[in-house]
Image (spheres, rainbow, N blue to C red):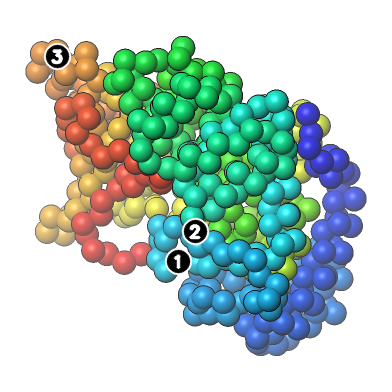
């Protein structure tokens, strides 16, 4: 099922929609936001120079530093009397970014989330358990609004209090769950600890996002909770969750490109990249009123595929996010993404899917230590067996990331659990990226 016909329009039709909306947005920001006017003037670009979406790359970029300089409301393009809601980024990296929404902005956001939920097969017959946090974070409200628009029965549980989450999951028997992938795993392990299993639930599917996760993590969650897992992506600056979502074909996340136009750029040269080349994801919002963004550098790394999808949607698809450029660790000169390490750990059946990466510097040398929880069978095994598993993990991790790291297996349930976004890396080098 497809929520909105616009998801299936031809390339030409999408081009026309995007062009018309971009022109409107460029005029809006030029007329209302000093920041954009100055930037465009400095580059000698006038709104009239933008004649279609093909002119997008003539426009200047915006990044999180620009937002910090104009914090909190300096880039808003609507008067405060039109603003009906605020959200702010969770501040994972730096100063929070504040988003304002007009009534229409909220309607567009809900519409995009409704498309996403429909992609996961959700209808008004379903019941959605929202375990994303409600508050300044966009996760809870975002999924909630889209779910109500579809007409599904929506449970605003919010994050935390995992025992209560499980009581609701087993008593209300929702058919859909949404939260971060790491919280889904935590819920699964608490379920087990409470002597219950997926048989006590009625979940068909889960909609997970807000942090990078791997295919291995997806498989683990699907197995433990007995559901089909879908990936939802978004960021506060652009609107919140619902910017893109994977369909049943599981070949990338369909972007709501009639509202948010994606580009991939090479982060060094800032030049646009073609399809299927990994680079930094950049978005231009073309229907937002309060907080439009022109060529916003997300720092998320992915690629775009604009070929049509077997599901019938024609919207461009982004590959699963590899990570943020801010998350990339440079260890002894080698680029390492925590997701590469996660893939290896989750492939091993001797360890649990909980790990922490500690980076340090001894003298002039960077060191990396990875602590991984053993599963209960391994824990009761001989030391020799435990050492063999450690050796194997060390070897497998080294062959994936290209540098050595020490691996220490620790007792079950001793590493931190996360109710929202996970934090897997502690970098003690005090280097600045
Ligand atoms: P913060 O930057 O403080 O975490 P947000 O809560 O707005 O602020 O989070 C947005 C970011 O979360 C994205 O830029 C991206 O890095 C990450 N993210 C969101 N959804 C996904 C997803 N499905 N896969 C990977 N990363 C995601
Ligand atoms: Zn599809």
Q: Is residue 222 above or below residue 294?
A: above
Badge 1 element:
loop
Please name the residue shown 33% across and 26% down the image: 190
> Which of the two labelled residues, at mark 3 and mark 1, occupies the earlier sequence position?
1
Q: Position of residue 236 (x, y in %)?
A: 56, 58
Left or right position of 407 against 7: left
Q: Which residue is mark 2?
A: 136
Badge 3 element:
loop
The quarter of the picture where the C terminus appears is bottom left
Asked if labels 1 and 2 touch by Cβ distance under 8 angstroms, the answer is: yes
Question: Considering depth in this image, is 315 or 364 the residue closer to the camera?
Answer: 315
Q: Is residue 190 above or below residue 16?
A: above
The outermost residue toward the left is 383
Q: Which residue is mark 3?
A: 380
Q: Is mark 3 within 8 Å of ligand 1?
A: no
Q: Is residue 186 above or below residue 318?
A: above
Please name the residue shown 35% across and 30% down the image: 163
Q: Residues within 10 Å of mark 2 (few under 14, many from 20)?
A: some
> Which of the two labelled residues, at mark 2 and mark 3, occupies the earlier sequence position?
2
Q: Is residue 132 above or below residue 204?
A: below
C-alpha gap between disc 2 and disc 3 = 44 Å
User: Given this view, does label 2 or label 3 mark the residue nearer the observer?
Assistant: 2
Q: Which residue is mark 1?
A: 96
Q: Is mark 1 within 8 Å of ligand 1?
A: yes
């Amino acid at each position: 099922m497809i929520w909105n016909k616009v998801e299936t329009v031809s390339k030409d039709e999408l081009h026309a929609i995007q062009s018309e909306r971009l022109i409107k947005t460029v005029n809006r920001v030029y007329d209302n936001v000093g920041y954009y006017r100055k930037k465009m003037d400095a580059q000698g670009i006038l709104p009239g120079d933008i004649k279609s979406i093909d002119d997008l790359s003539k426009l200047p970029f915006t990044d999180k530093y620009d937002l910090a300089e104009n914090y909190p409301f300096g880039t808003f393009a609507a008067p405060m009397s039109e603003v009906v809601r605020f959200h702010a980024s969770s501040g994972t990296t730096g100063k929070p970014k504040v988003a304002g929404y007009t009534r229409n902005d909220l309607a567009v956001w809900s519409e995009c989330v409704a498309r996403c939920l429909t992609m996961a097969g959700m209808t008004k017959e379903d019941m959605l358990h929202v375990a994303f946090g409600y508050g300044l974070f966009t996760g809870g409200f975002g999924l909630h609004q889209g779910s109500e628009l579809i007409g599904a029965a929506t449970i605003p549980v919010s994050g935390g209090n995992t025992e209560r989450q499980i009581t609701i999951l087993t008593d209300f028997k929702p058919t859909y769950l949404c939260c971060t992938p790491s919280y889904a795993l935590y819920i699964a392990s608490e379920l087990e600890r409470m002597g219950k299993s997926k048989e006590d639930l009625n979940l068909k599917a889960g909609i997970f996002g807000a942090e990078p996760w791997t295919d291995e993590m997806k498989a683990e969650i699907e197995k433990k909770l007995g559901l089909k897992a879908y990936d939802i992506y978004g960021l506060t600056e652009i609107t919140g969750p619902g910017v893109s979502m994977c369909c049943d074909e599981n070949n990338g996340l369909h972007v709501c490109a009639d509202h948010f136009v994606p580009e991939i750029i090479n982060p060094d040269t800032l030049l646009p990249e073609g399809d299927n080349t990994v680079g930094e994801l950049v978005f231009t919002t073309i229907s937002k009123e309060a907080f439009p963004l022109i060529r916003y550098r997300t720092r998320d790394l992915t690629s775009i595929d604009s070929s049509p999808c077997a599901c019938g949607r024609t919207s461009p698809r982004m590959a699963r996010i590899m990570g943020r450029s801010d998350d990339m660790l440079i260890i002894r000169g080698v680029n390492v993404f925590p997701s590469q390490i996660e893939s290896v750990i989750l492939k091993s059946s001797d360890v649990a899917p909980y790990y922490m990466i500690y980076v340090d510097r001894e003298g002039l040398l960077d060191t990396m230590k990875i602590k991984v929880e053993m599963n209960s069978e391994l824990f009761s095994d001989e030391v020799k067996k435990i050492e063999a598993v450690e050796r194997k993990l060390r070897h497998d991790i080294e062959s994936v990331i290209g540098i050595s790291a020490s691996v220490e297996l620790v007792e079950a349930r001793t590493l931190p659990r996360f109710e929202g976004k996970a934090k897997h890396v502690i970098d003690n080098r005090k280097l600045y990226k």
